[in-house]
Amino acid sequence: MDTTTPDPRTATRGEIRIERFPAGLDGDRPDARTQAWFEAVSFGFHDGAADPAHDAEFTRAYMADGRTLWGAYDDTERPGVWDPEVPVATYATLENDLNVGAGRMLPTHQVTAVTVRATHRRRGILRAMMTEDLRRAASRGLAMAALTASEATIYGRFGFGVATFTREVEVDVRERFGLRAPATGSVEVADPASMLGLAPRIFERFHGRTTGSVGRQFGYAKRASGRWGGDKPEVDKALRVAVHYDAEGRADGYASYKFAGWETKPPTLKIVDLVAASQDAYVELWRYLGAVDLVERVRFPAAPVEDPLPWSMLDGRGYEVKSVEDVLWLRVLDPVAALSARPYERDGEVSLEIVDDLGLAAGRFRVDVAAGRAGVERLRDDATVDARVAVDVLGSLYLGGAGARTLASAGRLPGVDGTGVEALQRLFGTAERPYCITHF
Ligand SMILES: CC(=O)SCCNC(=O)CCNC(=O)[C@H](O)C(C)(C)COP(=O)(O)OP(=O)(O)OC[C@H]1O[C@@H](n2cnc3c(N)ncnc32)[C@H](O)[C@@H]1OP(=O)(O)O
């Protein structure tokens, strides 16, 4: 493969060429390379043939996001074969801030749009793109990589560990629905068009106060405004939006939602996006959603794991957890920068050996926490350490989403004795569970 550093496992497959490029326009259409890339992504995610009019919108959004697109091309000529300019594999990256706790932001390398054509699967194409990409991100000084995964079995081998979860919940909003929390501020129905400007401002406040939150790409405001329905840049007339205002009249939360249709029994509202910059806003938006007439259920696919809602409901049994979904997967690229960036709730110290097959984060380190800040120092390779931790497990520990005790019970901290587990539990543990409502 034609990558800067050939992967020894795939270098013999000379017919695959890998290119990196920014999304680009040619007049008011995507340029040929970008259009062909969209074709491949649509194919990979079973979305049907790409629509150039839609793709022009997506191209503008990708340009605003500063995405880098990767395509893997097979130039082998065969009669009737699909245009060789349509990549057989795709991959894309962008960068946004991750809130690592107490509002501290860590610039994070995000990976998305991974597809490999069935005809080219299991030939090391993903491995070649991902190892090269992570190496480049690390060399650009990024301390963390992140993704959201379609399957839980793919990315652990590349050092990613699950860091946050959400729950899909369904709330019974018939007559017995009521909340104990005293009402605060007010909720008004908004003109969806106003969300183009308002949604990003509300999100920024949510983002600043929520550990685990990742900055949002351009498309989110378009969706909140109904300009992009679902995943298409087409006006969504079914989308409704309610905004919460605090006692001073400042907008501090919104819920965008849709009626699921009369054929859905019982009648249901589906929350598309709920962004609350305060707990009051969260509860009040639910009070509003629970008061909408002619519906019996409200479905929310992205509720926090620690949700105040059932504790506020007069009848907590009306809150049903349908499923739990992993959202953010984290991959430490630079242990010194990543471990010094996050805040710590207890002082103390622990020494770690990080095991990383890709070598990027491998080594021994001492984490010394005083007044909530960590000094992190690289140790000699033969230094004695308290715990040996695989880099994907470190990704799960990093935001406090998984406890060291739980991971040890699950067999994910082999060889770490009870003292080492307790040291990790004490130092990495957080009172609040991380929460990410951004998918990318
Ligand atoms: C971040 C995102 O974009 S999430 C979306 C991910 N995309 C999809 O799910 C689309 C459908 N799937 C695909 O396109 C492909 O199957 C991919 C991208 C998952 C894998 O691509 P491939 O090029 O076949 O992977 P590659 O040959 O490089 O394999 C790398 C390793 O992952 C393993 N692997 C690949 N796919 C899977 C899988 N679905 N489940 C478990 N292991 C897998 C391989 O066995 C290999 O293991 P090894 O290197 O330890 O021996």
Image (spheres, rainbow, N blue to C red):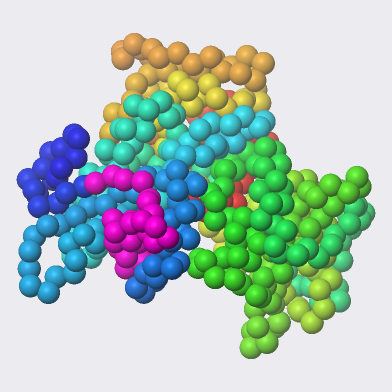
Residue 366 visible in this rendered orientation of the protein: yes
The magenta stretch is 19-45
Residue displayed at 24% across by 46% down: 19
Residue 422 visible in this rendered orientation of the protein: no
Observer-nearest of 200 and 416: 200
Expressed as whole percent of the image width and height from the top left, the position of residue 157 reads 31, 44
Asked if residue 256 is positioned above or below residue 424 in the image, the reply reads below
Q: Pick out the residue farthest to the front.
A: 27
Q: Quadrant of residue 431?
A: top right
Residue displayed at 75% across by 72% down: 172
Q: Quadrant of residue 292?
A: bottom right
Q: Quadrant of residue 412?
A: top left
Expressed as whole percent of the image width and height from the top left, the position of residue 36 reads 29, 61
Observer-nearest of 27 and 320: 27
Expressed as whole percent of the image width and height from the top left, the position of residue 386 reads 44, 20
Asked if residue 174 is positioned above or below residue 311 in the image, the reply reads below
Q: Is residue 313 left or right of residue 228?
A: right
> Which quarter shows the N terminus?
top left
Q: Is residue 340 left or right of residue 389?
A: right
Q: Is residue 101 left or right of residue 21?
A: right
Asked if residue 292 is positioned above or below residue 252 in the image, the reply reads below
Residue displayed at 12% across by 38% down: 8
Expressed as whole percent of the image width and height from the top left, the position of residue 348 reads 59, 17
Answer whether residue 387 is magenta in the image.
no
Asked if residue 424 is positioned above or below residue 245 in the image, the reply reads above
Residue displayed at 59% across by 36% down: 99
Count of marks placed on residues:
0
Answer whether residue 29 is magenta in the image.
yes
